[in-house]
């Protein structure tokens, strides 16, 4: 039995005290534990009863016999000792009886403690005999609010706490990206709340949300704090293009690669632009179905720079891809949403790519203005947007170019840029 | 990573004394999205050969710098600028330019995205070396690097039927001349060009092999700016100013060239013009029309004005023409200073130049 228990400790890598505490609820209900309880109770009941018996009998004698001789004879029978001469009065008689029984009482208490020790040993045996309570692992996977299975990188410095009534009971280990795990006793089925800090700009979307320790998976939702908004959300494009089932997927892949190219448009040694390296596409894996107000809230909650959705539909020989680009409070001088529409054919690949690059750049400039970043960075970004859009013959490109010009005029207080001769 | 094997395509008649060399790597393009695993290698091979065709011996004047186009003969396909840089960094020749890209099946056709990474010329500290310098006062000089390090070209719609069965340049057939159809062998790994024509090139196999002609396949029906621009940059690095101007003119004449490529082409044209004593400012104006909010354009603008001023004789610098150029520079600084960070040391040098040359 004991070696098995030791092996259990080794496997679970927990201390005996931890193991004991975890097993306590189970051990306490075991038959051996009940034997121990009975022993303790019986020992002390009997000891206390026996130790009080002479006093009870003395009171009975005093109440039964009125004459001193009769009382002394009865007391002699009771205690086995002859009472001293002249012992009179109830109080004096009771004190003498208590004194005569002191050794007996001590012996009875000793027996009571001895039996208690035996009961403790029985309890320990019961604990050792009880198989260790298996921990169960709770897999915690954070998800960005408003997405399905999008795993935001909260960094390895993030601190997650599990709380019961405001008290921290555990701090699960963060295993990277959006994952953490918590090992708890299967017997523990309490409801808990979570607290998250230092999570690379993410916060819990619903900090009051409760989770059960009895569950095996938790999926807390995260939203972004007030850092730069650098996520481009790609919602599923509806596709009714039978000849090109994967057209929408390829279109999305192409847009996703755009986000990664933005940092390289600016000088690598100017590290003020490094934040653009965190620009990333996020596949929402769902259809976009929000009202304008919801979309705006979604954008803020998710640190979203843009939200893209659209539809692929057949038109004659080719498919047509219609995109809607939402920027919520960052749309600036652009219409909300910005609508682009391109026939999906090889010759249009470049324009489609560059229109979206230009719109990302424009929204980045608005985002930079909102955070009051250096003005020269905003102007450079707007310049790049103009460079991309101005060469494209398309209504959306014209809208971007005009939006850039308007924004730049506002930044320069209406002063046109005319190169000197 | 082991040093990557590369096919060496060396320029014709490079004097042995030319120790300096500009190396350009054309890496296999990523074709994982096109459903044709060979497409990326074929595309890169053709761009490699087309780029090779732009190499020429620069005129006697200028810096003796050779040109070399490298072919990545390893199963490594870069899919980002970082990977392109990694591929180049592990090559013995440490190429200054890397052309890489990816192909897509899109809308029933095949589209190729090409990207150019400028890794050099690098200074000893690994920072992109200045490609244009103008003297200031007291032995100081003002310099600029390439307008941008990452260049994105207009996608090329390619004709896959024209690509044939080739996967690398060594498989090209060698002919006695371009009129015959009977090959006399294969090109192999190492060769140099003797002359280029519109349809092919005369080559000599290295080290002491025979000469022959190779037909060069087409990539697409419409001309792409990828090769002209990359070839132009190589010529700039080689100080072949007139040759660079020829190629950048083609880039600017090409209606498919995107705005960013046009801006850069204008700025390179400005360097070529300044270096050959021509008007560089008109090229800056063209770039400025496309993007007046580029710090690179502003820097080249200031460089152009100072270069023009420096070309004047001492007497002329104090005369009306000198004053006009200084006034123009001052106006440009007033107009463009917002494109620079506060306390930018480069801009401070320009302002210092203006202070020492009162208008």
Image (spheres, rainbow, N blue to C red):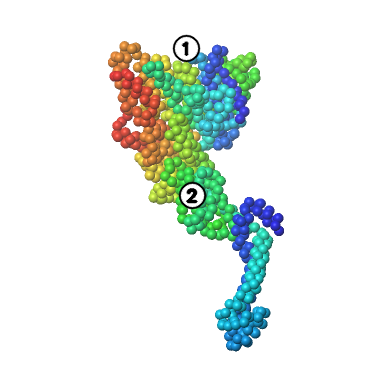
List the single residue furthest toward the front: A85
Q: Closer to the camera, B303 or A234?
A: B303
Q: Where is residue B328 in the image (x, y as percent from the top left)?
A: 31, 22
Vertical side of A278 occupied by B222: above or below: above
- How crowded pointer 1 is (Cα within 10 Å; few <14, some 14-19, many 20+) is rated as few
C-beta proximity under 8 Å, tags 2 and 1: no
Vertical side of A20 occupied by B147: above or below: above
Q: Residue at x 51, y 51 (%)?
A: A161
Q: Closer to the camera, B140 or A87?
A: A87
Q: Are marks 2 and 1 on the same chain?
A: no
Q: Quadrant of residue A361?
A: top left
Query: Element type at marker 1?
Result: loop
Whether residue B285 sits left or right of residue B113 in the image: it is left
Whether residue A197 sits left or right of residue B359 in the image: it is right
Q: Mark 1 points at which residue?
A: B61
Spatial separation of the CA atoms under disc 2 and disc 1: 67 Å
Q: Which mark is residue A196?
A: 2
Q: Position of residue A284 (x, y in %)?
A: 49, 46
User: Is residue B98 visible to us here?
Assistant: yes
């Amino acid at each position: 039995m004991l070696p098995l228990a030791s092996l259990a400790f080794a496997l679970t890598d927990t201390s005996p005290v931890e193991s004991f505490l975890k097993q306590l609820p189970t051990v306490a209900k075991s038959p051996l534990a009940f034997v121990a309880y009975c022993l303790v109770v019986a020992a002390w009941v009997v000891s206390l009863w026996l130790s009080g018996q002479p006093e009870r009998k003395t009171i009975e004698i005093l109440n039964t016999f009125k004459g001193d001789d009769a009382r002394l004879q009865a007391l002699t029978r009771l205690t086995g000792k002859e009472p001293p001469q002249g012992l009179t009065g109830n109080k004096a008689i009771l004190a003498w009886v208590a004194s005569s029984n002191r050794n007996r009482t001590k012996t009875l208490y000793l027996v009571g403690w001895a039996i208690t020790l035996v009961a403790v040993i029985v309890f320990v045996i019961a604990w050792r005999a009880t198989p260790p309570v298996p921990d169960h692992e709770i897999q915690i996977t954070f998800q960005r609010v408003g997405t399905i299975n999008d795993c935001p990188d909260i960094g390895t410095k993030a601190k997650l706490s599990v709380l019961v009534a405001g008290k921290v009971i555990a701090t699960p280990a963060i295993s990277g990206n959006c994952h953490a795990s918590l090992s708890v006793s299967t017997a523990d089925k309490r409801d808990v709340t979570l607290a998250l800090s230092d999570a690379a700009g993410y916060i819990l979307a619903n900090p009051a949300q409760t989770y059960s320790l009895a569950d095996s998976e938790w999926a807390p939702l995260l939203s972004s704090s007030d850092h730069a908004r650098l996520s481009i959300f790609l919602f599923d494009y509806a596709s009714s293009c039978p000849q090109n089932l994967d057209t929408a997927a390829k279109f999305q892949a192409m847009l996703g690669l755009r986000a990664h190219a933005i940092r390289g448009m600016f000088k690598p040694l100017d590290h003020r632009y490094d934040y653009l390296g965190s620009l990333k596409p996020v596949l929402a894996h769902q259809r976009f179905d929000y009202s304008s107000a919801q979309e705006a809230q979604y954008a803020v909650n998710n640190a979203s720079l843009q939200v893209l959705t659209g539809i692929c539909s057949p038109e004659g020989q080719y498919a047509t891809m219609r995109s809607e680009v939402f920027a919520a409070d960052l749309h600036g001088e652009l219409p909300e949403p910005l609508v682009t529409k391109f026939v999906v054919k090889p010759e249009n690949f470049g324009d489609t790519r560059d229109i979206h690059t230009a719109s990302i750049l424009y929204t980045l400039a608005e985002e930079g203005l909102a955070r009051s970043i250096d003005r020269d960075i905003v102007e450079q970004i707007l310049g790049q947007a103009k460079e991309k859009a101005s060469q494209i013959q398309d209504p959306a490109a014209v809208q971007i170019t005009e939006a850039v010009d308007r924004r730049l005029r506002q930044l320069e207080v209406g002063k046109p840029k005319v190169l000197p001769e | 990573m082991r040093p990557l094997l590369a096919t060496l395509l060396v320029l014709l008649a490079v004097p042995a004394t030319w120790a300096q060399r500009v190396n350009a790597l054309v890496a296999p393009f990523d074709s994982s999205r096109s459903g044709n695993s060979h497409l990326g290698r074929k595309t890169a091979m053709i761009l490699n050969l087309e780029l090779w065709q732009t190499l020429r011996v620069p005129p006697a004047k200028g810096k003796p710098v050779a040109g070399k186009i490298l072919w990545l003969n390893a199963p490594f396909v870069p899919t980002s600028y970082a990977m392109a840089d990694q591929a180049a960094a592990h090559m013995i020749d440490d190429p200054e330019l890397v052309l890489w890209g990816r192909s897509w099946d899109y809308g029933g056709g095949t589209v190729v995205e090409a990207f150019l990474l400028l890794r050099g010329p690098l200074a000893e500290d690994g920072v992109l070396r200045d490609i244009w310098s103008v003297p200031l006062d007291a032995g100081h000089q003002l310099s600029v690097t390439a307008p941008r390090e990452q260049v994105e070209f207009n996608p090329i719609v390619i004709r896959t039927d024209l690509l044939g069965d080739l996967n690398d340049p060594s498989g090209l057939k060698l002919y006695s001349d371009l009129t015959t159809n009977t090959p006399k062998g294969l090109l192999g790994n190492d060769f140099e060009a003797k002359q280029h024509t519109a349809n092919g090139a005369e080559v000599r196999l290295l080290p002491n092999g025979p000469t022959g002609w190779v037909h060069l396949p087409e990539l697409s029906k419409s001309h792409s700016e990828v090769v002209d621009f990359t070839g132009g940059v190589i010529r700039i690095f080689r100080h072949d100013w007139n040759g660079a101007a020829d190629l950048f003119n083609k880039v600017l004449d090409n209606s498919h060239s995107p705005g960013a490529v046009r801006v850069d082409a204008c700025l390179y044209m400005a360097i070529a013009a300044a270096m050959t004593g021509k008007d560089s400012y008109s090229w800056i104006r063209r770039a400025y029309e496309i993007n007046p909010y580029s710090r690179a354009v502003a820097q080249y603008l200031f460089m152009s004005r100072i270069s023009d001023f420096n070309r004047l004789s001492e007497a002329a610098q104090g005369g009306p023409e000198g004053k006009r150029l200084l006034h123009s520079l001052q106006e440009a600084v007033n107009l463009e200073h917002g494109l620079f960070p506060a306390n930018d040391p480069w801009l401070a040098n320009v302002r210092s130049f203006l202070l020492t040359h009162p208008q």
